[in-house]
Image (cartoon, rainbow, N blue to C red):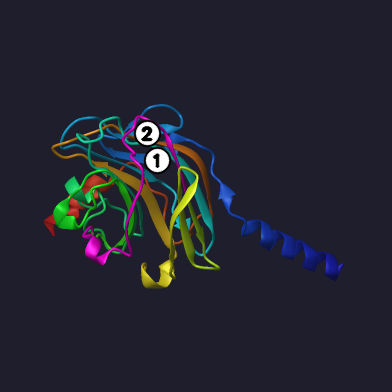
Amino acid sequence: MTNLKHLFCLLLISLLTIPATAQLNIQDFELGGSATKLNEQCIRLVPDLPYDSGSAWYKKAIDLNAPFEMEVCLVLGCKDDEGADGIVFVFTPIARTGFWGEGMGFAGLRPSLGIEFDTYQNYHLGDPAEDHISIMANGETYHGVSLVQPINVSNLEDCKRHPLRITWNPDTQLLEIYLDNELKTTYNRDLVKDIFRGNSGVYWGITSATGRLSNNHDICIKKLQFAASNQLPNLGVKYPRELMAKEEEKK
């Protein structure tokens, strides 16, 4: 009997630590700014209008002590030379959005980790001329201090869906980013200790903005696999991040 109880406990522990695959439901995202629901899987973060912004934040916090895997498709518009600005995947334990404009909802957010998909060259930020990916920390959008310097990719403003896969393995402390089914970059670091000050619970979301130039910026969710965090509460619609950001600016 004792052995059976021991086996049952081991089985229960193993089941509790297996990351769950979330049901694809846009209602699980908190939309801010101009973000709108296109269908049950897709969100338009910003329309093809100048000086606009939008965000979509998953309401459940995730635990970085467990692996996660996210599969989405990016659609960053149809205008190449006349398009801007891009999107950022943001991870942060703070329930608010950063500054818009060229900051794309990531700038000024500390502590944070941002995976940027940039389609516009801001010379003063050290952007290359080509569309590029970069990994940034703590709301710093100047690439001179980026964790991973900009990596050029093929044109993302081509009216097409671009498959994106982001994975995190806490055992190896390895973050991997696959775009168009190719591994584009990795980052190897203890994110919990070195970025998030020992906190393993973070919110994650996708933020976007346009400036003088613009494009539609859409994201379609395919797969979310993660372990929920018990450190942070689920987000509620009563406290949108944009309002919280304004409150912070007043202080």
Q: Amino acid at mark 2?
A: Ile
Residue 19 higher or lower than 44, as above or below: below
Evaluate whether residue 115 shows in this view. Answer: yes
Q: Quadrant of the N terminus?
A: bottom right
Q: Amino acid at mark 1?
A: Phe
| Nearer the camera: disc 2 or disc 1 | 2
Residue 238, percent across and down?
31, 43
Label 2, secondary structure: give it: strand
Residue at image mark 2: 43
Q: Are marks 2 and 1 in contact (CB under 8 Å)?
A: yes
Which of the 4 quarters of the picture holds residue 219?
Answer: top left
Please name the residue that numbered disc 1 is placed on: 29
Q: Which of the image's four quarters has the C terminus?
A: bottom left
**Residue 197 in view, yes or no:** no
For mark 1, does the 10 Å Cα neighbourhood hold few (<14), some (14 to 19), or many (20 or more) residues? Answer: some
Residue 120, position as x, y percentages in the image:
22, 44
Residue 115 locus on image (x, y percent): 35, 54
Q: Is residue 142 magenta?
A: yes
Q: CA distance from mark 2 to mark 1?
A: 10 Å
Dot 2 or dot 1: first in sequence order is: 1
Q: Which residues are magenta?
A: 141-165
